[in-house]
Image (cartoon, helix red, strand yellow):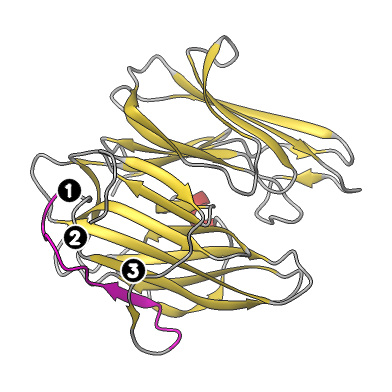
Amino acid sequence: MITTPLYRIVAAARQHIVGVRLGSPGAGLVIAALLGACGTDDPDTQTPTTSLLMPQVVLAPGQETTQCVVLELPNETPQVLRRIRSVISHGSHHLIAYRVPDGTPLQPEPAPCQAFADVINGASPVIIAESAESEVVYPDGVGLALKAHQLIKLEEHFLNPGDAAINGSGTVEFTLVEPQPSMLLANLMLWGPQQFAIEPHKTGSADYAHEVSAGMKVFGLTTHEHKFGTLATVELATTATGQATELYRNADWEHPPLKSFDPPLAFDGTQSLRLHCEWLNTTNDIVPFGISAATNEMCFFWAYYYPSQGFQQCAEQGCRIRVE
């Protein structure tokens, strides 16, 4: 029995995989059939869990690479995701699982890809994991819609800062239930500035604020920076620069915690979420916005919310909304 509160988002340090890996070493698919109640909306019961695996990637000392696979979930009918859990190895900066369109070619073997390209281009992430273990359990009566035989892209950004080779890998577990007419569908928002640069041997900061649409309920969020990051905060505000209530604070760029809200944050159309990031550039070069965890910086938060108004990716240029 898996025991959780009504819903939760947690990060821990365990690293293990439950299941039997099928096929060749690069097959990437694990199906863990946990005997118990099926078809229930309660993720606390032993609902069957399907796991997708990023096969091991050998990382040379100092190597930075992003690897992707495209895999298929085995669900024969449309399902609703009620719980998702990820485990990433040492040397993994982040792992993202995306829903990708029908017709996307399967790719069971890891291949180089561009980090965050799918997010920036409006694809729909399911989870963005930065801690050794992360888990999202949706609020009661809420879940994320998945198509039959849903195609999932796993993108894992690796960075080996040591002087010895290591093996990088990751696993994402999906707990699915049958759709119910009363169920509310969830989605994610990804907001943050992109127009910044940090001068050599200087501190720097950036801010981004945007109004949240009426009716949204946020039940979890976290932030993302690279190695020059010293602080990231998210505030609930009524204006872009006025007084605000701090919701989230993190000074550990490498392992930002996922914070849950019970009850969810409810928005009426008059409030904004305000993000603030700070950095210390210890190099001789300007550090701009970019995808490299070694030479660039990022500043954004992502939040899990319902009912779905689509995946929202917002920056200074405006918002891009993908409605499935």
**Residue under the point 69% across and 55% down:** 293
Element on which disc 2 rests: loop
Callout 1 environment at 10 Å: few (<14), some (14 to 19), or many (20+)?
many
Q: Which residues are magenta?
A: 25-42
- Residue that carries the numbered disc 2 in the rendered image: 47
Q: Quadrant of residue 203?
A: top right
Which corner quadrant of the image does residue 310 belong to?
Answer: top left
Residue 122 percent across, percent down from the top left = 44, 50
Q: Secondary structure at mark 1?
A: loop
Residue, x 57% and y 39% (percent of image)? 300
Visible in this render: residue 312? no
Of discs 3 and 1, which sits in the foreground?
1
Distance from the alpha carbon under mark 1 to that under mark 2: 8 Å
The residue wearing badge 3 is 51
Query: Which amino acid is tagged 1?
Result: Asp
Q: Of 225 and 119, which appears nearest the observer?
A: 225
- Magenta segment's dominant SS is loop
Quadrant for the N terminus in the image? bottom left
